[in-house]
Amino acid sequence: MPSFLRMSFFKTSKPRKFEPVPRFYDPQKEAIDLLMRKQEDSEKAKVERIKYKVKNNFQGSSAGSGRFSGSYKRSIKSSNLRLVIILFIMILLIYLVFIY
């Protein structure tokens, strides 16, 4: 979506994270990574990795709990506040136009 179509009042966009892409191949590092992966392939390490992935995927989400997360509530509150402010300004302007 083009940036001029996104309207935002009272908030700024977050900066993008820097994610460098490696441009060379290091065979020594690849060998070390392969050895480390082989060592971690025990059953306990697999279970721990799965637990970690599941925990990180669902952390902070409201799926299954029936409740909204804190960030979602804050965004609703800020959106409602913005709406009330805009409505108040519009009503005030209409009142001033018709009175004067």
Image (tube, helix red, strand yellow):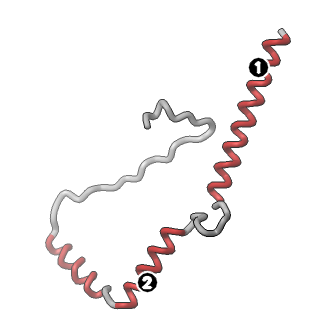
State the separation of the CA atoms marked 2 and 1.
61 Å
Say whether residue 96 is left or right of residue 36. right
- What is the quadrant of the N terminus in the image? top left
Can you give x and y, in whole percent of width and height, for residue 97 in the image? Answer: 78, 13
| Residue denoted by label 2 | 48
Amino acid type shown at disc 1? Leu
Which residue ends up furthest to the right in the rendered image? 99
Viewer-nearest residue: 24 or 45: 45
- Disc 2 to disc 1: CB gap under 8 Å: no
The residue at the point 16 percent across, 75 percent down is: 28
Compared with residue 22, is residue 79 higher up or lower down, i.e. above or below?
A: above
Of residues 6 and 23, the one drawn nearer to the viewer in this rendering: 6
- Horizontally, residue 67 falls left or right of residue 20, namely right
Which element carries disc 2, helix, strand or loop? helix
Task: Look at label 2 and name its amino acid.
Answer: Glu
According to the image, label 1 marks what residue? Answer: 93
Quarter of the view holding residue 45: bottom left
Dot 1 crowding, Cα within 10 Å, few <14, some 14–19, many 20+: few
- Asked whether, in this view, residue 2 is left or right of residue 69, the answer is left
Q: Quadrant of residue 20?
A: bottom left
Residue at position x 24%, y 77% from top?
Answer: 33
What residue appears at the point 67 percent right and 54 percent down from the top-left corner? 73
- Checking the image for residue 56, the label placed there is none
User: Residue farthest to the bottom?
Assistant: 43
Q: Is residue 5 above or below residue 27?
A: above
Q: Position of residue 100 (x, y in %)?
A: 83, 9
**Secondary element at image label 1:** helix
x and y, in percent, of residue 40 in the image: 32, 85
* Image x and y of residue 54, in percent: 48, 74
